[in-house]
Each structure stands twice: as C-alpha cells, then as structure tokens.
Image (tube, rainbow, N blue to C red):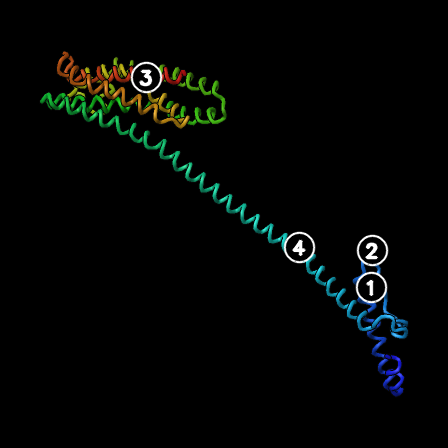
Amino acid sequence: MIEKRFLKLNNSQQILVLTIFLLAIKEVNSLALKTRSPHTPSRLVGWSDFKSNKSSCTDIIHERIDSHSQSNNLQSLKTAVPVSQTQTIAIMEGNKKTSMKDDQHRKKITTNQLILQTAVPAMMNLAIAPLVSSVETMWIGRMGDALALAGQSAASTAFLTCFYFLSFLPTIAAPMVASSFGAGKHDETRKKISETLSMCNILGLLGMLLMTLQPRFVLRMVLAADAPAMTVAIPYLRLRALSMIPALVTATGFAAFRGTLDTKTPLKISAGASVIKLLLDPLFIFKSPFLAAGATLATFCSEVFASIMNVVTLSK
C-alpha cells in the first residue's frame, strides 16, 4: 500500500519523501539509543520496516517517542530526588534551629527561676539585720537617755568598721566553695570551708582583743577623746566585741551556703537568731545592770546560736 503510493510520486517528490524518511529514521534511532535500557535492548528502525510493511513505521516512531517521554519522566524524577533531599535537609535544619531556640528558651526560664529562687531569700536575709538593729535602737531610745543612744550608735559604727575590715574571708569563701562544689569535689569543699572557719577564728580573736583591750583607740574613729558619749560607748563596744568570732563564723557559713546556691538555709538560721535577739533585747536592757550595753549580750547570744547552727549544718 505504501509502496504503491510512493511509486505514483514523481522523481522529485520521491527524493523529498526519502530524505524526510531517512532523517526521521536517524532521529528515531538516536532517541532509541539514548533511552535504551541495558537489560531491554531496543530495535532500530530501518528501510526493511518500511519496505516489508510488517509493522507500521509510524507506530514504531510513536513508540520511540513514548519511550523517550517516559525516559524524560524518569530523568525528571531522578533529578527531583536531590531537590526533595535538599528540602528535607532544610526542614531538618529548621527543626534543629527551632529545637535549639526552644532549649535556649527553657534554659532562660530555668535560669530566671533559679535567680528568683536564690535572690528572694538572700534579699530577705539582708533585710533582717537592719530591721533587728532598728528594734535595738528603739529599745535604747525608750530609756530616755540621749547619751546612751549616742554611745550605742558610735560603738556599733566602730564595731561594724572592724568587722567589715576583717570579713574579707567570707567574700573569698563563696567563689572557692562554688568552684569545688560545682566540680563535685565535696571533700575539697569541706576542707576549704574548714580552713576558712579556722582563719575566721584567728582574725575574730585579734579583732576581739583589739576592741576589748583598746576600746578608746577604736572609738576615736567616730568620737572625740573627751566626748560625753564615750562613757556609754566603751562598755558597749567591749561587750559587743565578744560577738566578733561568732559573727565572722556566721558570715562565712552564709557565704559557703551561697556558694552552693542555697540561700534558704541562711535565711532560716538568721530568722531564728533574730527572734532570739528580739526576745532578749528588752530583758537585758531593762532588767540587767548593763543598761544600753545589755543589748550586746542579746546580740552575743543570737550570734552564738547562728554560728553553731551554721557549723552543724555545714558539717552534714
């Protein structure tokens, strides 16, 4: 059928048809070679197909074109895989960043909670001392003696000056305890606390001897040598000096607890000691021969209680 139609054409038309057909065969065969699978070899289109008419050349060409389209689809799928992987990696990286942000947020919340848990008891502990001191001043003011109030104020200032001059050990103890406790070296922590307490006893003894034996020399920092308030300030300072050692021990204990991020225990100890002082202040001021200086005995009892509780608690 095809041959009869072909023979009816003139020479120029036959040449044109053959040229087009040969070009089509060449293009189809090249596509077949590109898309051919190694396991399923593809048959090439030739003149025999056209001449024998065993299979339609058009069908073969369409078959090759369909095969080529399927190959292109497979190739597009293959090239789509890396894109999918890239998207997956991007999603994973985004999830990681989100997870890191969530972790940072949780750490921030945990840090804020830790600051509040440690700061609030520490602030309350710091507020107790001036409140108790104000109550002591109130009771001495109830005596109606201006010299007693002036002597108490001068002696307290002199004592606190000596105390802060010698209380550098608690400041050093806090970071030392924090470093060893944070590293899990509990034996080393106990050793450092013990050494610091021993040094506090030595320095406290020196300060106590200075204020007990030379109270006038210490009071010269705040009072004139012939000041009328000196008669009240000297006995007050001598009795107040007795609490220098327990005061340094208490300060060192509080610093050690702060080094372990425990500010609740010092607050409890300080509250108990303050209750003792508040109860004993009016008793020693109005019911003892020491008058205004009797307040120092109440302070001594409260400081001894606090120091003993600190040592006992730290030893555990």
Task: Kindly report the distance in space between the C-alpha atoms of the residues bearing marks 1 and 3.
Answer: 97 Å
Q: Which residue is mark 1?
A: 33
Q: Secondary structure at mark 2?
A: loop
Which residue: 33% across, 16% down? 309
Labels 4 and 2: the sequence-earlier one: 2
Task: Kindly report the distance in space between the C-alpha atoms of the residues bearing marks 1 and 4.
Answer: 25 Å
Name the kind of residue labelled 4 in the image.
Answer: Val
Q: Quadrant of residue 288?
A: top left
Q: Which residue is mark 4?
A: 81
Q: Nearer the viewer, residue 102 or 310?
A: 102
Labels 1 and 3: the sequence-earlier one: 1
Name the kind of residue labelled 2 in the image.
Answer: His
Q: Nearer the viewer, residue 73 or 145?
A: 73
Q: Position of residue 82 (x, y in %)?
A: 66, 54
Q: Is residue 99 left or right of residue 315?
A: right
Q: Which residue is mark 2?
A: 39
Q: Secondary structure at mark 4?
A: helix
Q: Give the numbered dot on residue 307.
A: 3
Which mark's residue is nearer the viewer, 1 or 3? 1
Q: Is residue 12 left or right of residue 134?
A: right
Q: Secondary structure at mark 1?
A: helix
Labels 1 and 2: the sequence-earlier one: 1
In this view, the residue farthest toward the left is: 144
Query: Looking at the figure, which quarter contains the N terminus?
Result: bottom right
Q: Nearer the viewer, residue 8 or 41?
A: 8
